[in-house]
Image (cartoon, rainbow, N blue to C red):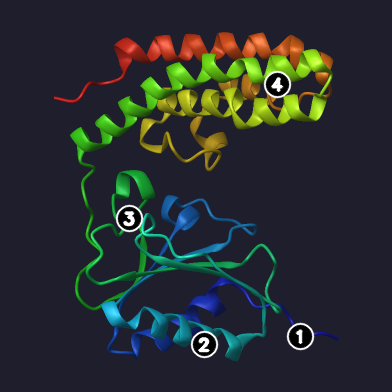
Amino acid sequence: MGRRRIGRREIIGALAPALRRSKDILALWEAGAVSFGRFDEWSDIDLYIVAEDSKVEEAFRLTERALRKLSPIDLRYRVPASAAHGYEQTFYRLKRASPYLFIDLAVMKRSAKEKFLEFAIHGKPVVHFDKIGVVREKKVERKVFLKRLHKRLEALRTLFPLFRVLVLKELNRGNDLEAFGYYMGGPYKYLVEALRMRYGPLHWDFQYRYIHYELPKAVSRKLVRLTYIPDARALRKRFPEAERLFWSTVKGLRPWLPRDG
């Protein structure tokens, strides 16, 4: 018989004390589905670490050493560094754990300004230790948030009519794959953003994450119909439905969406 699989509790139970022992690792908390109280057997583990500025790599080293004591690391992917992120990120899949229970680890410097602690947006973190009191709720900066949202809304009002022709062009040419690709990557994507602005503006840029929880069921059913399209003929028929839903949603945002100031 093979060894039994390890679970969330064992993984966190191994990582937290190993990281806490280091004077350079200042905080560890869980985010993601756990923060919203709706994790299940298919949830992964979203972890945030705050480390002294020069000890980011040490945080990864200690994490990997603790994980290997539990299980061989089956897959490991380090996300290419990006100044836009403001953190370093690595994914781990453990051989002895469910493939759903992979670890999404972000390590932030102590000096980092953005630590994703707007509870209204990211949920309430589950703190495993916090040596310096870093895990404090940060209120959403309303003016900054709304300015960004309104800027994107204005872009959507231009992007949708501009790129709708790419879908129609490829349908007219008989290039079904191109038509579907342009649809999903353009007008459909813009529709999803508009719907999220309408029904859950704090998550308007979350793409498809949590979408089934945050859209009304009737709206979700419409979106499902506009997602699962069997062929080019159906796409040509349903694309106008997507357009109508987009424009009615955007129009409905005008009096509803709060303005900054």
Instruction: Calculate the distance from the C-alpha at mark 3 to the C-alpha at mark 4.
Output: 34 Å
| Image height of 125 relative to 108, above or below | above
Q: Amino acid at mark 3?
A: Phe
- Count of picture labels: 4
* Residue in the picture at 38% in, 28% down: 152
Crowding at mark 4 (Cα within 10 Å: few <14, some 14-19, many 20+): few
Name the element at disc 1: loop
**What's the residue type where badge 1 is placed?**
Arg
Sequence-first disc among 2 and 3: 2
**Could you say where residue 175 lies in the image, as x and y percent from the top left?**
81, 24
How far apart are the alpha carbons under marks 1 and 2?
18 Å
| Mark in front: 3 vs 1 | 3
Determine which of the numbered discs, if any, sits on residue 66 in the image: 2
The disc, 4 or 1, on the residue closer to the chain's N-terminal end is: 1
Mark 3, secondary structure of its residue? loop
| Horizontal relation, residue 218 to residue 237: left or right | left
The residue where tag 1 is placed is 3
Asked if residue 216 shows in the view, the reply is: no
Query: Viewer-proximal residue, 38 or 99?
Result: 99
Residue at 49% x, 53% y: name it.
33
The relative height of residue 239 versus residue 214 in the rendered view (above or below) is above
Foreground label between 4 and 1? 4
Residue 36 image position (x, y, % from top left): 43, 50
53 left or right, relative to 5? left
Residue at 64% of width from left, 59% of height from top?
Answer: 41
- Which amino acid, mark 4? Arg
In the picture of the structure, the residue carrying the numbered disc 3 is: 116
Q: What residue is pinned by disc 4?
A: 225
Of callouts 3 and 1, the N-terminal one: 1
